[in-house]
Image: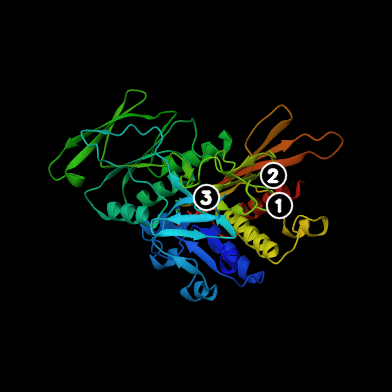
Amino acid sequence: MNTQNDKVVAIIGYGTAGVNAAIALRTSGYDGVVRVFSDTDIPPYSPILTSYYAWGEKSYEECFPWSEEELADLRLDVLADSAVVELDPEAHVVRTAAGDYPYAKCVVATGATPACWGFPGVEGDDAYEPLVLRSMDDAERLKTTLENPACKRVLISGASMVALKTLEACLNRGKACTLVGMNDHVLDFNAFPQAAQRFEKGLREQGVELRLGQTISSVVRKDVEGGFEGRELEVTFSNGEVGVFDEISVSHGMKSNLDFVKPGTLEVDRALVVDEFMCTSDPDVYAAGDVAQATELISGEKRVVGIWKNAALQGACAGRVIAAELAGEDVRGECAKGKYALDDSISTNTIAVNGILFISAGTIELSDDRYLEVREDDDMTVVCLYQKCDGADDRLVGFNVVCDHDEEGGVAYDTGAMLTLRIERGL
Ligand SMILES: Cc1cc2nc3c(=O)[nH]c(=O)nc-3n(C[C@H](O)[C@H](O)[C@H](O)COP(=O)(O)OP(=O)(O)OC[C@H]3O[C@@H](n4cnc5c(N)ncnc54)[C@H](O)[C@@H]3O)c2cc1C
């Protein structure tokens, strides 16, 4: 291996985590080659904004958080349309269809892809693919669908944040919306039932049909002249009831993009397992964002916390650590550790669907040594989960705020910010 190649830092994935790794490399003084592998030919975008683009709240240009100048300043060697097909940590090589690229250090920042687990497919239309939401291509397809007046009835399958953002886009385009979710409440991984109920009431008041505790059993295509794409979709739900829709959107979770990692070379659980420096089981491979499984604050377990802030902080951590290591610094030494190690991650969510606001942080996992406190008034429900601490004040480990109106800088946001801080500080 020549000296030049020894210094190359490879970043796989040109999203939030990847860009923040690049920024941190440069701001930490690394001056060598940063080669970025992207599977698209567009600049890094924000998946958060895709639903807003689909319903017309944001323009296409507004979905790209970094300007051309900001990206140019990073002096990156961006290989566009160059999906990585193999990462071989033993050989220190990243492989694409165009060839092999050696590296000294590598950051895996490939994000995640929507999963359609449990969607039964469509009888009579093997090629049918439900709407999903992650990439700009997904957003474009959702936008085109929602702009078509022939599409009147949309079924949203799933009850997560992504499902609710899709629901909001459909509502704002005047579609009749049904949401089907396998659990008893929306936001099933983030909301306590007491908070979810208030949110659900708000959705029903906006005309959303909620089918909670149900799944899609089967879907049959029926040809209909003049129908959306010349057909309609007859859906049978798990309770035996039948509904007819023009389009179906599926948000059944996300799967980390890791198919290219050479089997047996890195520790993989649900994603790439990393330490507090975002380093994987290979000392020269780091991971950040939706593809990394780092320590989560409340559980102490390694978990994927798939949110924007986390991806940005983890990418920045990887970049700083790599720059220091390439400069010969021992980041793990007692003096340096505090400077380079990243704090444990914490799950936070803020979502508003046409004025109904939901804010959460921490965990909703109940146990014998935890208890809930619920405060409800005319326009807001606050649910707090406490951990009993012998001989000390009980510690807040999770909360939900649901408010009937979404007022920027209002009491709900202040409450959410204050409670989030308490969780982060272990108070
Ligand atoms: C609809 C939606 C709404 C969301 N709303 C919120 C929100 O309100 N708040 C919040 O905090 N988070 C939200 N999130 C989550 C947030 O967007 C993600 O956590 C964050 O974008 C993760 O960043 P990342 O860099 O890990 O992945 P990404 O931003 O997805 O970037 C990964 C990049 O790697 C590329 N890639 C994949 N495979 C390869 C390969 N083999 N070779 C080369 N490149 C590859 C991908 O195409 C992509 O461009 C939302 C997500 C979605 C989908």
Q: Residue furthest front?
A: 1
Q: CA distance from mark 3 to mark 1?
A: 29 Å
Q: Residue furthest left?
A: 225
In the foreground, 94 or 311: 94
Residue 358 percent location from the top left of the image: 55, 47
Query: Closer to the N terminus: mark 2 or mark 3?
Result: 3
Does residue 353 appear anywhere in the picture?
no
Query: Closer to the N terminus: mark 1 or mark 2?
Result: 2
Q: CB atoms at circles 1 and 2 under 8 Å apart?
A: yes
Question: Going 56% across and 65% down the picture, which residue do you hit?
Answer: 5
Q: Is residue 327 left or right of residue 66?
A: right
Helix or strand or loop: what does disc 1 sit on?
loop
Question: Going 32% across and 23% down the picture, which residue do you hit?
Answer: 240
Question: Going 65% across and 48% down the picture, which residue do you hit?
Answer: 345
Q: CB atoms at circles 3 and 1 under 8 Å apart?
A: no
Residue 251 percent location from the top left of the image: 42, 42
Which residue is label 2 attached to?
A: 297
Is 61 located above or below residue 345 in the figure?
below
Helix or strand or loop: what does disc 3 sit on?
strand
Which residue is label 1 attached to?
A: 343
Helix or strand or loop: what does disc 2 sit on?
loop
Which quadrant is home to the N terminus?
bottom right
In the foreground, 288 or 49: 288
Residue 34 percent location from the top left of the image: 55, 67
Question: Which residue type carries mark 1?
Answer: Asp
Which residue is label 3 attached to?
A: 88
Q: Residue furthest right?
A: 391
Q: CA distance from mark 2 to mark 3?
A: 31 Å
Question: Which residue type carries mark 2?
Answer: Leu
Residue 41 percent location from the top left of the image: 38, 64
Is 321 located above or below residue 150 in the figure?
below
Q: CA distance from mark 1 to mark 2?
A: 8 Å
